[in-house]
Amino acid sequence: MRTSLPEVIVVMGRCLAVIGFERRRASTGGAPMIDPEPDPYQVEYNRLDSDLKRLLKQVREFDGDVQQDLQQRVETAVNNVLDAMARIPHADNTEETKRRLAATAVSALALIEADIVAAVSPAIPAAASIGGTGSAAPTSSSVQAFMNRVRSLLGAAATRVWTMLSTRLTLKEWSLSGQVSGGVPPFSGQVAMELTFG
């Protein structure tokens, strides 16, 4: 009886899987191997990383005049968020260090939106005045669609950051304040947030 090469490969793969299982089982003293549950913080971190990478992709694909400078600023802020959030769960961090890292992550996340709004908001009146001239400049609707995608991704990232922080720190109190200026809605105004961890 002849066996085809694909059948041999399948059988060999099954044998190697059994051998690997038996080795792992032997290394645990004969106890059955149970894959550990994934760390919820790490799962959320991976999702945050994915959300922020999609945000960075959106920024790279935007056709604005300030694209290169904006990309660099957003990429730096994204890296700051991810770095701070990756360092929070380490056992050697004191509560004070965790608080500083949390503040860094939240500040960098807010900076991302502020940088994008500052770079894109001048394009809205310009895009509206260009209208349908056939120019390669972004239209008002494309800028608005871009901002909607950005806000959606930032909202998801902010939710993940808060979820992650709530597992490692206790929020004692918070306050939110803001003011509206005469800019182009919804890109006008300032927001300040104060967090106290306890």
Image (cartoon, rainbow, N blue to C red):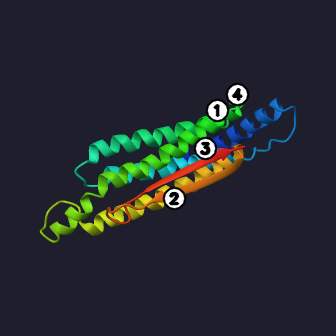
Q: CA distance from mark 2 to mark 4?
A: 30 Å
Instruction: Give the left or right position of residue 167, taking residue 8 as reference.
Output: right
Q: Nearer the viewer, mark 1 or mark 4?
A: 1
Viewer-proximal residue among 23 and 186:
186
Label for residue 97?
A: 1
Name the kind of residue labelled 1 in the image.
Thr
Q: Which residue is mark 3?
A: 8
Q: Are marks 1 and 2 in contact (CB under 8 Å)?
A: no
Q: CA distance from mark 1 to mark 2?
A: 25 Å
Looking at the picture, does residue 92 appear above or below residue 170?
Answer: above
Instruction: Give the left or right position of residue 109, taking residue 24 as reference.
Output: left
Viewer-proximal residue among 49 and 36:
49
Give whichever of discs 2 and 3 has the lower sequence position.
Answer: 3
Q: Nearer the viewer, mark 1 or mark 2?
A: 1
Q: Secondary structure at mark 2?
A: helix
Label for residue 155?
A: 2
Q: CA distance from mark 2 to mark 3?
A: 50 Å
Can residue 4 be spotted in the picture?
no
Which residue is outermost to the bottom?
132
Q: Residues within 10 Å of mark 3 (few under 14, many from 20)?
A: few
